[in-house]
Amino acid sequence: MIVIVLGFMALILVFGLGAAAGLWLRAARVSAGADAHRDAFVQSPTGMLLVDPDTLRIVDANPALVRSTGVPLEELRAGTLGAIFGAADGDGPDLLVAQLRDSPARLLVEATQRCRSGRQLLVEISGHPLQSDGRVLFALSTRDITLRRRVQAQQLERQQHLSHLAHHDQLTALPNRLYLAAHLPKAIEEARREGSALAVLFLDLDRFKHINDSRGHDTGDRLLQEVARRIRAAVRDEDMVVRMGGDEFIVVLRRVLTVDEVGETAARLAQTLNAAVVIDGRPLVATASIGVSLYPRDGQTMGELLRQSDTAMYQAKDRGRNTFQQFTPAMDRKLKERVAVENSLRRALAERQLHLHYQPIVDIRTRRVVALEALLRWRAHSAFIRPSRFIAIAEETGLIVPIGEFVARQALADLRRWRDSGASVVPLSLNVSAVQLQRTDFPAMLAGLLARYDVAASMVQIELNESAMFERHDRRGDPSQHAIERLRELGVRIVIDDFGTGYSSLSYLKRWRVDVLKIDRGFIRDLSVDTGDRAIVEAIIAMARHLNIEVVAEGVERQRDLRKLRDLGCELAQGILLARPVPAEQCLQFLSGAPLVIDSPESPADLLEGSGAA
Ligand code: C2E
Ligand code: MG
Ligand code: MG
């Protein structure tokens, strides 16, 4: 019984004590909570304050705020929010308070904080409403974000700097291709919205490569800088001037009203570039060819407009440079035709549609064949396409390289076959483009083929077109010059083709130690009627004789011209009068060693006499 009573009392005691302890603990926790809040307020490393929302008075502030502002607590308490904080970018603590008043959720604003020292910090203020002694106060806490913002600003600046670098050309400081790609579509879009027109001018300096090669890259760079400056100065601020790379520039004219206006700008650009630039005391003129395309007339997209201004620019180059051309649909057709020819030429090469025909070069007196010129033929759908339609395109696209290799291989293979069949073979004359000499190791390729077919180098001569070679011959370090020397060392003879159509600079005849000159058929055609042509041919023959160079008259079609040539002392001729170009299978007729039979109705006895007299 005692045990039960004791036990009961113990239980009461335990429960009673427990309950009492619980009550006490809860009370302690409440006051500890308030203390903890107070502690948190006092010890917080960030500035905190309590504000009366009605008067914006600062009711209390913590030591961190006192420290960071440098303003004593009493003074803070005597002031309002506006005494310390101001608005950063329009948002201020007043706004924060106003917003808190409207919707008492947690909010965040940026503000400036004035310090006693005069310094101004950038702070982030967050706030929330708080019940205290039956009234509502706003508790605000501040965070110094001055440093973070400064770092962010630096990062932004660095990014902008990098982006500027990426979008601008180092040499001229003009915007570059990337910039154009980012901004031209926007300009087009703007024009579309406004219903205005926009012009794209593609500007390419004439013979800049020549200046670069002959006067050095440093001079070239300085010239480009000056050109960039002049172009920029010749157009309005709102117009875009971009350096695409090398000597290519794009000018985008916005809000174009008339086509004439574009013409005037192009003329102004040409004029400013026509004035000489003096570099290191020496004047330089960098003229430009300009192609123009217009939005919306010529195209709707950046790609189209650039392509068309580029096409027009090439047309300007074709027209003799230092001029400007507007894009026309006809140019586009021409371009498309070119692309079509290029594609089918590629296929022709792969599908063996290319063939060689051979035309004899004949000794006028003896009528014997002294050489065979290989002429390229492209057989497409049972018709032959003449080289004049595709050689230039092959050169531009580089296709001339594999084509040229095919020609050399096929010609040597044919020669080898004729020789094996017992024919008395003659040297082959191969037409070679300047592009082949410059872009590939043509002498090495030819030497390899000569060895492979076991043909002596003296059985090959190379025909170089005069105008094509002259365009490049005066460049120092020109690879074709070197190639010609190596061909000569091999023992290959050098022929200048179409002589008289280019610049006819006589110095290179000596420099290249030319073996043969082929007088262009333009001089031969009217030889018997045109005394001027006759005088020229006479002079060429006399000069060649002095230089110990052989002369071939090309394109001889009439007996009387052949007669005249013989009278003028020309020894070799080629032309349909003597023999047309024929496929390899029909060449054995030229390789018998016997004189050619000319079955011309006009076949004159005096020529035969001439041959007999030789
Ligand atoms: P080319 O080397 O001056 O060749 C002579 C051209 O005159 C040939 O034209 C020939 O067929 C043509 N011809 C020959 N006799 C007469 C004639 O009596 N009267 C007239 N009016 N023409 C005659 P083709 O075959 O059309 O070749 C044109 C040009 O294409 C060649 O002029 C040559 O520069 C180039 N070419 C031809 N084959 C090749 C080649 O394999 N490689 C390279 N790079 N160019 C070639
Ligand atoms: Mg030729
Ligand atoms: Mg020729």
Image (tube, grey):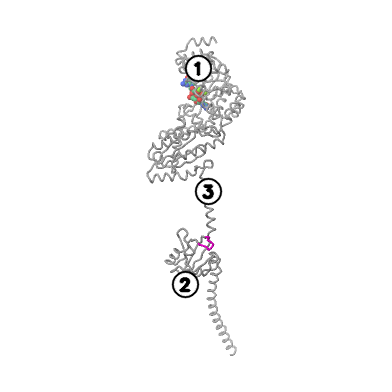
Left or right, 514 with reference to 182? right
Measuring from the top left, give residue 409's x and y in whole percent. 56, 27
Mark 1 or mark 2, earlier in chain: 2
Q: Secondary structure at mark 1?
A: helix
Q: Which residue is mark 1?
A: 537
How would you rate the neighbour count of disc 1 (Cα within 10 Å): few for under 14, some for 14-19, many for 20 or more?
Answer: many
Q: Quadrant of residue 13?
A: bottom right
Q: Name which residue type carries label 3.
A: His
Measuring from the top left, give residue 247's x and y in whole percent. 51, 36
Q: Secondary structure at mark 2?
A: strand
For the N terminus, give its image quadrant. Answer: bottom right
Q: Name which residue type carries label 1.
A: Val
Q: Which residue is mark 2?
A: 131
Q: Which residue is mark 3?
A: 161
Q: Are marks 3 and 1 in contact (CB under 8 Å)?
A: no
Q: Quadrant of residue 474?
A: top right
Mark 3 or mark 1, earlier in chain: 3
Q: Name which residue type carries label 2.
A: Gln
Magenta residues span 113-119
Q: CA distance from mark 3 to mark 2?
A: 51 Å
Label 3 lies in ligand 1 vicinity (Cβ under 8 Å): no
Q: Quadrant of residue 10?
A: bottom right
